[in-house]
Image (tube, helix red, strand yellow):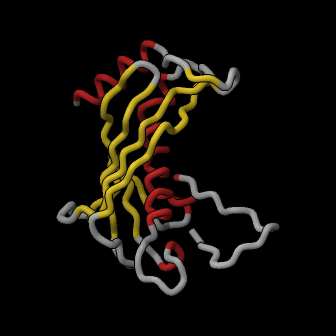
């Protein structure tokens, strides 16, 4: 997860995905959590902690985990995606290079065309909470480029997961 400290118009922005993060050896999946070892490639030069933008990127990787586990198999091969309606974060404590963190998610409210995911970033042993992030998403039809109702079976599946 190399970070560029300069900017050049001809340099493509590095996109971090769950697959690239896991294949880099910096992370692994443990049940419904993403476990990440914070290494120096994730840190802005001259700092010793994760930036809020890097925390959001790591949360996005955990959102991919949710998508694979909870949505992909239930989509009935429809052209289904989500778009972000809002994202908020509360940062409680710095995440220092060398830390091993756990990023977990929980489904929140499921209403109409959207739903909420709550992410908690904690120490590996869950003894300290570093940050909490909420993402409100709207289901999106990739062909018509419009919001959509999710398939009924997916909606029921998400409600069941949210209830635990």
Which percent across, then down, holds residue 39? 46, 76
**Residue nearest the viewer, comparing 35 with 134:** 134
Hey, which quadrant is residue 115 in on the image? top left
Quadrant of the image containing the N terminus: bottom right
Residue closest to the far left = 127
Residue closest to the far top = 152
Relative to 127, is 4 above or below?
Answer: below
**Residue nearest the viewer, comparing 122 with 28:** 122
Res. 63 visible in picture: yes
Which percent across, then down, holds residue 18? 52, 52
Which percent across, then down, holds residue 127? 17, 64
Quadrant of the image containing the C terminus: top left
Drawn side of residue 88 relative to residue 10, left or right: left
Relative to 45, is 110 above or below?
Answer: above
Give the residue at x 66% y 62%: 14
Which percent across, then down, holds residue 88? 39, 49
Residue closest to the far bottom = 46
Relative to 12, is 63 above or below?
Answer: above
Give the residue at x 71% y 73%: 7
Relative to 141, is 63 above or below?
Answer: below
Drawn side of residue 128 relative to residue 56, left or right: left
Res. 30 visible in picture: no
Residue closest to the far right = 10
Give the residue at x 35% y 25%: 110
State how many labels appear.
0
Give the residue at x 37% y 22%: 111
């Amino acid at each position: 997860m190399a970070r560029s400290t300069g900017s050049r118009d001809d340099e493509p922005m590095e996109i971090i995905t769950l697959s690239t993060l896991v294949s880099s050896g910096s992370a692994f999946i443990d049940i419904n959590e993403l476990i990440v070892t914070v290494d120096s490639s994730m840190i802005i030069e001259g700092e010793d902690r994760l930036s809020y933008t890097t925390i959001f990127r790591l949360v996005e990787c955990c959102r991919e985990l949710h998508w694979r586990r909870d949505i992909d198999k239930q989509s009935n091969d429809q052209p289904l995606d989500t778009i972000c309606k809002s994202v908020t974060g509360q940062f409680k404590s710095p995440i220092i290079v060398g830390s091993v963190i756990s990023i977990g998610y929980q489904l929140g409210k499921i209403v109409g065309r959207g739903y909420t995911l709550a992410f908690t970033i904690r120490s590996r042993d869950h003894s300290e909470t570093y940050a909490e992030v909420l993402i409100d998403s709207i289901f999106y039809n990739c062909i018509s480029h419009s919001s959509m109702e999710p398939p009924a079976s997916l909606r029921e599946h998400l409600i069941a997961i949210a209830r635990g």
